[in-house]
Structure formats: C-alpha cells, structure tokens
Amino acid sequence: MKGSTKNIIRMHGYRLDRALHNYLYFVFYDLYVRVFLFLGRLLQRWLSRSRLSGSLFKMVFDRYHAKVLTLADAEKILELNEDVVVGPDRTERIIPFQYANKIILKEPEFIAVMDCPCRLVRENPCEPVNVCMAVGRTMGEFWMEHGAKFNARRVTQQGALEILHEAHDRGNITTAWFKVATGGRTGVICSCCTCCCGGLEGMRIARSLKGGERLMFIAPSGYTAVIDFGKCVSCGTCERVCIFNAVGLDGEGRPVQDGNACMGCGLCIEKCQGGARIIERDPAKGLPLDIDLVVEELGQTRG
C-alpha cells in the first residue's frame, strides 16, 4: 500500500467507508463525474415530477458542495505558509452545509495540480484541462502517487497563482470544494466554467426537479457586486461574463442585476471596462472564505 493511501486512511480515522470513497473518487475521478452526470440526467428525464429525485439530490448536496471564492480570497489560500485548521463550522456562516464543513489546510505550501474531471468528460472541453488544485500535503501526495493518468504534478505557490490568474483571464470562477469523501474538508480548489463544470450542471438539474427548486450546493462567496451607474459605459461585459445569469440589460443597454442570483465571484468587477463595479460584503450571503477573517471570527483549532 502506498504511503499516501495510508495517510488518507489515517485522515478518515474509523470511517474506513469514507476512506474507500476518497480513494475511489480520485483514482477514478473522470468516471465518477461521468456517472454522477449520467444519473442526474436520468433523474431529470424520467423522475422530474417525483419528489424522490429532489430528495436524492439533497442527500448528495449535503455531502458534496463548494463555496465561491473571489480572486483575492483564493490568492490568500495559495499563498499560505502555515497550517490553518478551523471547524467544523457549526454556525454555518462560511459553509452552510451539514456534513462537509471544515477548513483544514495542512502544509499548504504543498500544492498539486491535475486534469479537471469535468472537462475530461466533455466532448469539446475548455482548455487547458490541467487546472484542478489540491492544497495540502495529504491530498497533494495522494494525487501525485495515484493521478498519473490525470497528469498530476506538483507546482510552486507562484505556479498555482499563475494558473489561478490565467483561469480568471479566461472567464472562469474559483471554487473551494468541501466533500465528505475528502474528510469533510476543503483543499480542492477548482477553476469552473458554466459549460464544463459538472457541479454547476448538477445544480441546474437539481433545481429543475420537483422538490429541488431551491436546492443550492454552491454557496455564495459572502460578497455581492454593486454597480456605480455614474461610471457605467453600458458595454454589456458584465452580462456576458456572469456565469450565474445574475445580470441582464435594460432597453438602453444598462445592466440590471439580480442581487439574489449574484454569487459574488467578482468576475464582473475584474472585466468591467468602465471600472463601474465594486464588490461589497453581504451579510445575507454568509462569511467569506477569507482566511484572515475566518480565523479572526471563528478561531483556529488544533488539527
């Protein structure tokens, strides 16, 4: 048995079932995503009017979910030089989910990158494919030892920041994933697009089902984008780049924003041609995954 596999078992403790889930999840990453999407589409096609389908999605979403990160908050994670252990977040201020709700980043300088499984299962995926990051030695070493077919490689913190910035330049958003299969913690950082991301597709499917209309397994960043109409040049960029369809245009080409739909990813602010958009803290959308703020508000615990 490889050393990284033993570390995964130790991480899960007595829950050998979750350790096995963790192993299968990442060793057969692309197959796992393909099966999830296949079953989701099947439910949508044949059981869309049954509350059972919505209940099944809720069961999954309680154990497998993400939080949107702004570029600045993601940069802080990738620049960490000390361990951060917070949670479980019983307040649900950062991570409003029942099971996977811990922020555990041990030896965060160890970062591995491998191919995104969501892109691998698409016929014409967005490029590049090699964008998924594991922050922390336990998961990073597991990827390195088991992810050769996914082109797993170790990168420096500077290399990880370059991947992050290039993704935002392409119009991707950043998400931190929390999964029961990975110890109920974060550490997997993804660059997501609406056309390839299996998580975003899964959420769209779930919300189309009876009983799943309000299901949300991607939590907002804790911020909302705000428009300064005095600076707006009516270029329509914000409407084009928003992957959550939170921005429309009125008859004069000016942006009209749905504040409830805005997830606070910050992409529209980065792309705004007139500098007319800013991002503000929004208490209704939880606490941002800003490492400094999280430690200050919730306190660090022993890992």
Image: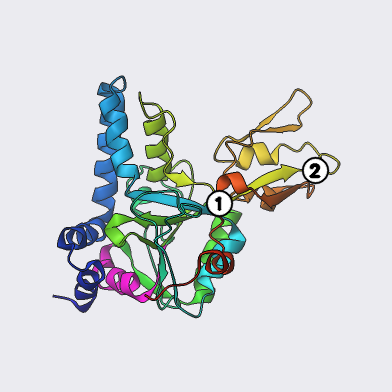
Magenta part, dominant SS: helix
Left or right: residue 225 versus residue 140 is: right
**Which residue type carries mark 1?**
Ser
Q: Nearer the viewer, residue 79 or 30?
A: 79
Relative vertical location of residue 269 with respect to residue 41 in this rendering, above or below: below
* Callout 1: SS: loop
Q: Quadrant of residue 115?
A: bottom left
Relative vertical location of residue 210 with respect to residue 16 in this rendering, above or below: above
Left or right: residue 62 versus residue 275 is: left
Reading the image, the residue beneath label 1 is 221
**Which residue type carries mark 2?**
Asp
Residue visible at 41% across and 77% down in the picture: 110
Q: Nearer the viewer, residue 105 or 142?
A: 105
The stretch of residues the image draws in magenta is 133-149
Query: Sequence-wise, which precedes: disc 2 or disc 1?
Result: 1
Q: Would you say residue 143 sits in the magenta stretch? A: yes
In the rendered image, residue 32, in percent from the top left (x then y), is placed at 25, 49
* Callout 2: SS: loop
In the rendered image, residue 262, in percent from the top left (x then y), is placed at 60, 40
Reading the image, the residue beneath label 2 is 228
**Residue most extreme to the top:** 49
Look at the image and tell me in which quarter the C terminus lies: bottom left
Would you say residue 127 is visible in this rendering? no
Numbered marks: total: 2
Q: Would you say residue 106 sits in the magenta stretch? A: no
